[in-house]
Image (cartoon, grey):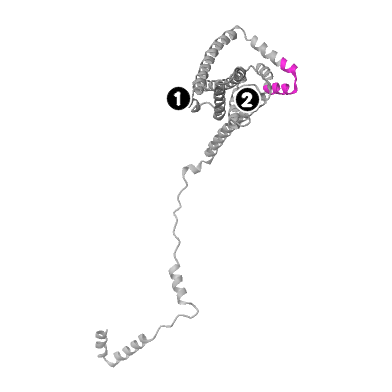
Amino acid sequence: MAQLIRPIRQLSPQCNHHFRNLRHLFSKKLPNPPSSIPTLLLFSSFSTAKSPPRRRIRPAPPEALTPTVIAEDDGDSDGSESDSLRSRNQRKRDARRAVKWGMELASFSGEQVKRILKAASLGEEVYDALMLAKRLGSDVREGKRRHFNYIGKLLREVEPDLMDTLINATKQGDHTTLQTLISSAKDVADDVGGSYDDDTETESEDGEEGSDEYIAMAARWFDGLISQNVELTKEVYSLQSVDFDRQELRKLVRKVQLVHEQKKGTTEEKQKEIEAALVTAENSLKQFLCSMAKQMQSEQTDLYL
């Protein structure tokens, strides 16, 4: 800077005069900013004032231009879902109604149950299951619940109006209505014809073969449980396809074993009492095992249908 100013000063006095004016102009201070505006605010306003980011507007997808088609599809799916929901609810109601029938039938006597089953064209399988339910005590709630579910499964195919009429007539002691329904059921069976008789004979033969199978299975289980055979005991208690009360089964097996132990070293006078108690205990266990074998056989039959 000094190298530039020194040649200018060596010029004429007129140039020196202009130089002094120029130096005086540069020596003046710039005015301060007004005190009402803080310096910090000015800097902060400049530092924070940023323009918002721009957003690109994308065109709507072509699927959004056809809402009518989507609404129709949703309506069809909702309708199918509601129909399936109604069918599931109806099946649940039918199952509960059948279980209720089983509980009411189990409260009747054996002869009353036979008359109702005869009028409803139901077989011995339902009768045996109901008689077993009558023997189950109040201390086996879970076992009774499962057994009544099994009875309800056997009663689901019965006409609801017919079963309700039979149960109400039995409660009220209306023997005339019961006899009329039994006679009508017998007449329907007689009016079917000779082909029905042939089919019945075939079914009875198949039923006898099936009954022989489950009776043999129950007898095998009975011998294994009483003799405390480890393999057969595991086989029985590990069954998953049959709903049965394991605690009740253990109780029945233990009762038979206790009577066998009491039979040893007894006098002749008490021998008859022990024999009668043994027959009763063995029959209870056999009926329980027969019901299990029937249920397992019916489950296997349903799998192959």
Horizontal and vertical percent for residue 21? Answer: 34, 89
User: Where, by quadrant of the figure, is residue 189 drawn?
Assistant: top right
Residue type highlighted by circle 2:
Arg
Label disc, if present, on residue 77 of the rendered structure: none
Q: In this view, does 185 lie above or below 6?
A: above
Main secondary structure found in the magenta portion:
helix
Q: Does residue 208 appear anywhere in the picture?
A: yes
Return the residue at label 1.
231
Horizontal and vertical percent for residue 145? Answer: 60, 30
Horizontal and vertical percent for residue 230? Answer: 46, 26
Return the residue at label 2.
135
Outermost residue, top direction? 194
Q: What element carries label 2?
A: helix
Residue at x 68%, y 21% (from the top left corner)? 109
Horizontal and vertical percent for residue 132? Answer: 61, 23
User: Where, by quadrant of the figure, is residue 247 drawn?
Assistant: top right
Q: Does residue 305 appear anywhere in the picture?
A: no
Residue type highlighted by circle 1:
Glu
Magenta extent: 163-179
Task: Give the mark nearer the N terminus: 2 vs 1.
Answer: 2
Given residues 179 and 147, the one toward you in this image is 147
Outermost residue, bottom direction? 13
Q: Is residue 213 above or below residue 153?
A: above
For residue 279: magenta? Answer: no
Given residues 14 and 187, the one toward you in this image is 187
Q: In this view, does 142 lie above or below 15?
A: above
Whole-angstrom CA distance, mark 2 to mark 1, is 28 Å
Given residues 215 and 82, the one toward you in this image is 215
Residue at x 45%, y 25% (from the top left corner)? 231
Q: Looking at the rendering, in which quadrant would you find the N terminus?
A: bottom left
